[in-house]
Image (cartoon, coloured by chain):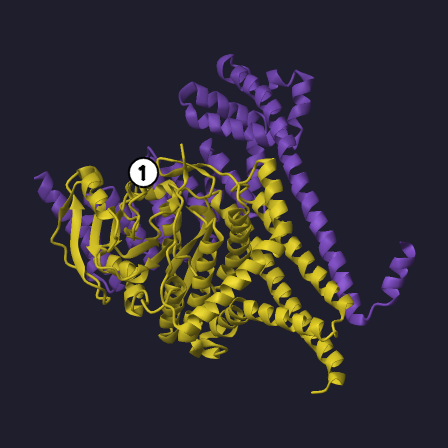
Amino acid sequence: MLEYSKQFFSDLQPADFFIVGAILLFTLVSIVLFIAIVLSRLYHIRQAIHFEKNTETINNLLLEVLFNEKSYFDLIEDKKLLRLFSIPQFRAQMMESVINLHQNYEGEYAESLKKFYVESQLMADSFVKLRDKKWEVKCKGIKELTEMNIQRAYDHLIEISKTNHPILKINALNGCIKINGPQGIIHLAKHKFTIDLWTQLNIIDALKKTSLLDTQNIELLLQAKNNSVISLGLKIIQTFRLFEKQSHVEALLQQKHDKHILKEAENLLATFSTYGKEIN
Amino acid sequence: MGPSNLPFLVELYLNIALVYAVTIMTSYIYLAYLSVKELKAYSKKNSFENYEVLLSSEYAPYLSIIAPAYNEGFTIEENVKSLLSLNYNHYEVIIVNDGSKDNSMEILQSTYDLIPLELKKIGSIPTKNVKAVYQSQNSAFNKLIVVDKENGGKADALNVGINFSKHPYVVCIDVDCILDKDALLKLVKPFMENNHKRVIATGGVVRIANQCVIQDGRLIEVNIPDKLMPRIQVLEYLRAFLLGRMAWERLDGLLLISGAFGAFDKEIVIAAGGYSTKTVGEDMELVVRMRRYMHERKLAYTVSYIPDPLCWTEAPESMDIFMKQRSRWMRGTIETLWSHRIMFFNPKYKLLGLVSVPYWTFFEFFAPLAEVIGILATLYFILVGMMNWHYFFLLMIFVYAFAILFSILTLFTEERTYHKYNKINDFLKLLAAAFIEPFYFHPLSVISAFKGYIDKIKGTHSWGEMTRKGFNKK
């Protein structure tokens, strides 16, 4: 066999060398990819097992926080739990559970969860995420901090919302709205990048979900130099039927603007007029 | 030419074959690299998107789904119901009965309580005569419009649908496809995202549904087909959609949006002249023509593409139907490339003219021909006893090893992204299919494509009957 192989390779021409080399490379990469698929499946199975195991611990722990008024410091008296808290995977899963649970609770229970979030340094983890270079990590941090309504994050969110990255911008603006209601987007009046329709609809959706309805100064969006911001302002006024802003829309029509903006403003006034007639 | 020249000719032929193979392989690897990058970016972005925003917004774009139906009586009732229950508010469904010879129209009339409607067409694309337009009396089906027309083929039926559609975006689909409930939410998003370039079309991935379980017009269980022919097509579709079209989207050189599932900006479709009834590859031809229209007017535009598995279709299981389908695809490719030959290596069309069209010409149109020439040349060299067997076998193993590598790369990509085939058995079946494909499926594809050349030369223009077996229902 060895003799044959030696003979085979000694007979090869330069083109043959290339082909044989390529065949060996293709075979090797195929085997590596196959092993990668197998390992990926095994990894997912292992992750699922760990997840199951952690879920039980986390559920028990959060039940203690919610219903037995245990603080983080009470819980870490158990050295096993303290050790678990230092494992990144456990912390990440813990963060997810706390955030998910917080979405479903209000009042005292929500407050207990927030207290736990702060004491356990999960909040610090979220702030670290805001400083990460990766936009997706930043988004995660934003979601966590805004779900917990951490007012201290507001200025960071305003700063992040000035980005040109569409998804990061949506998440940051949603965060601003969640923490500060409609006032969280007034700064967009000076926004320099275009806000596409998808982002606009996300902002309006976030406004619909907020319980804060202070729409004071929302008309400042109509004075922006950025057409997409004006368009957003018009959509907000129409969606929330802000009749009191009608004069600002009429004033907008008197100015020189892009024809799409003028059409949108005209449509808004027409809708208001129809709506007014229906009410009467 | 004397026999003394033959060894040189054999050598030359084998070297040309090697260069051609290496060029195709390099392009595949490069496209796969771009696709994987694009897929990763898409998956990351997608995990932060909230598509439900569109469900509650009065500003969500309005869509018209257009589904041509020809002799679909067996499945039309359920298929239409499934189209009417998609997760989206602002849409209408236009079923265009293209002169079916079966009872499709009667089924639609009785199931949906249809009454004739005085509806004037809005678009101006020339089409065959429309017999009548119907709307349902039942308010539960108020999104449904049925247009009954003379038979004129799929392209003509789609044009009729476009002419009658009320909304600015048209979603053209095959009526027998199974759509994901959120398909419209995902398909419409690209139209709302790009401010600097007009999105003129969005395509979605089509996957094979043979052996999958369907309940109430929705796919509820993904399985690998039992038969080898559709099973290999699963692999083929994964390769084409996951490792091919994503790359072309990234390069902004996508020439084809599958006729089974795509959304278009109606204004541009009408301005470009609608679907061409002169070709059997009307889906590709329309995209190329719309792109040409935008290029020639120097309008900023793009064509978008969604990698999520949103549309599931039945693949041919019999050799006869498979060959008809592939022959038609080849005819469609030839007709489109010929109609737009002005773009070939034309710098005026930038990437489209310099890369996309030549790529399709050399690697989609010409590849089967090159293979047939290769087989004939090989036979000749064997007959005259001049075959360099050593080099020949090396080349064969080289191509085979690459085919296997590329299929495993596809499986790896699917594994790391959508992971739809999660049963170990299904994965092993696909892996085995990858090893069999070059000996069984690939030669059939080449023969079918070659039949396409011959049919084109003979002037055949028909689609051929595409009998469907229907899906597994629960």
Q: Position of residue A171 (x, y in %)?
A: 45, 43
Chain A's shade in the image? purple
- Please tell me whether residue B301 is drawn above or below residue B235 in the rendered image: below
Q: Residue at the spot x=38%, y=59% of the render? A: B464
For the C terminus of chain B, the quadrant is: top left
Instruction: Determine if residue B439 is in view.
Output: yes
Q: Nearer the viewer, residue B339 or B204?
A: B339
Question: Looking at this rendering, what residue extends furthest in the left direction?
Answer: A280
What percent of the width, then of the height, locates residue B241? 50, 54
Percent position of residue B262, x then y: 38, 55
Going by the image, does A138 lie left or right of B89? Answer: right
- The image quadrant where one finds the N terminus of chain B is bottom right
Q: Residue at x 48, y 64 (%)?
A: B252
- The percent position of residue A150, horizontal first and vertical second, equals 47, 33
> Could you tell me which chain the residue with mark 1 belongs to?
A
Query: Residue pushed farthest bottom?
Result: B1
Q: Where on the picture, by quarter, is residue B123?
A: bottom left
Q: Residue furthest right?
A: A3
**Badge 1 element:** helix
Left or right of B299? Residue B352 is right
Q: Is residue A263 left or right of residue A26?
A: left
Q: Which chain is yellow?
A: B
**Location of mark 1 (residue):** A208
- Residue sitting nearer the eye, B205 or B169: B205
- Residue drawn at x 90%, y 60% is A6
Crowding near the residue tagged with mark 1, few <14, some 14–19, many ≥20 C-alpha atoms within 10 Å: some
Is A235 on the left or on the right of A107, as rendered?
left
Q: Quadrant of residue A74?
A: top right
